């Protein structure tokens, strides 16, 4: 089975893929959130022969939906109208911050004023979300 992991963000959406037999999620692509990410994702599902989607479930530390979760639910609804692939949610607790730690700044590459490494972690966050899901599936087997 081929999986697509999604880390939804207000500006960008990170995507990752994995094969169930290998059990390892890899960053795949980053797309813009606007104008219509559902159509782009549906095209990727078709072209990459995706059989299941795993989207990061965005929660506040107390376990309630955070501000972005409404947008995630909207995306799930739009995708459900476009594709017949199962969609599951997986908690994304700190996936973006964990993926940022994996970015290592190169020498002579400018850093932002916030001292964060240059580059985007969105697809890496998607890979972390998808990997958590796959690891749970292995434990349940």
Image (cartoon, rainbow, N blue to C red):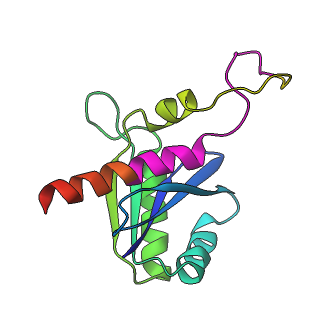
Quadrant showing the N terminus: bottom left
Residue 62: % across, % down: 26, 28
Viewed as shown, does residue 111 lie left or right of 37? right
Between 131 and 95, the residue placed more toward the observer is 131
Quadrant showing the C terminus: bottom left
Residue at left offset 52%, top offset 36%: 99
Q: Find the magenta span and give its range.
A: 111-130
Report if residue 125 lies within the magenta region: yes
Residue 17: % across, % down: 49, 63
Between 101 and 44, the residue placed more toward the observer is 101
In the displayed structure, 131 sits above or below 112; it is: below
Evaluate whether residue 9 shows in this view: no
Residue 102: % across, % down: 55, 32
Residue 111: % across, % down: 78, 21
Evaluate whether residue 27 shows in this view: yes
Picture quadrant of residue 60:
top left
Residue at left offset 48%, top offset 73%: 79
Viewed as shown, does residue 100 lie left or right of 113? left
């Amino acid at each position: 089975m081929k999986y697509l992991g999604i880390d939804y963000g207000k500006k960008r959406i990170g995507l990752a893929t994995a094969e169930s037999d290998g059990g390892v999620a890899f960053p795949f692509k980053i797309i813009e959130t606007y104008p219509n990410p559902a159509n782009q994702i549906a095209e990727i599902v078709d072209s990459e022969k995706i059989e299941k989607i795993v989207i990061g479930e965005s929660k506040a530390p107390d376990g309630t939906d955070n501000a972005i979760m409404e947008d995630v639910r909207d995306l799930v609804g739009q995708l459900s109208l476009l594709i017949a692939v199962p969609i599951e949610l997986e908690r994304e607790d700190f996936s973006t911050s964990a993926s940022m730690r994996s970015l290592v700044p190169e020498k002579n590459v400018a850093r932002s004023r916030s001292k964060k490494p240059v580059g985007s972690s969105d697809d890496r966050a998607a890979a972390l979300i998808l990997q958590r899901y796959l690891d749970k599936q292995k434990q349940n087997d």
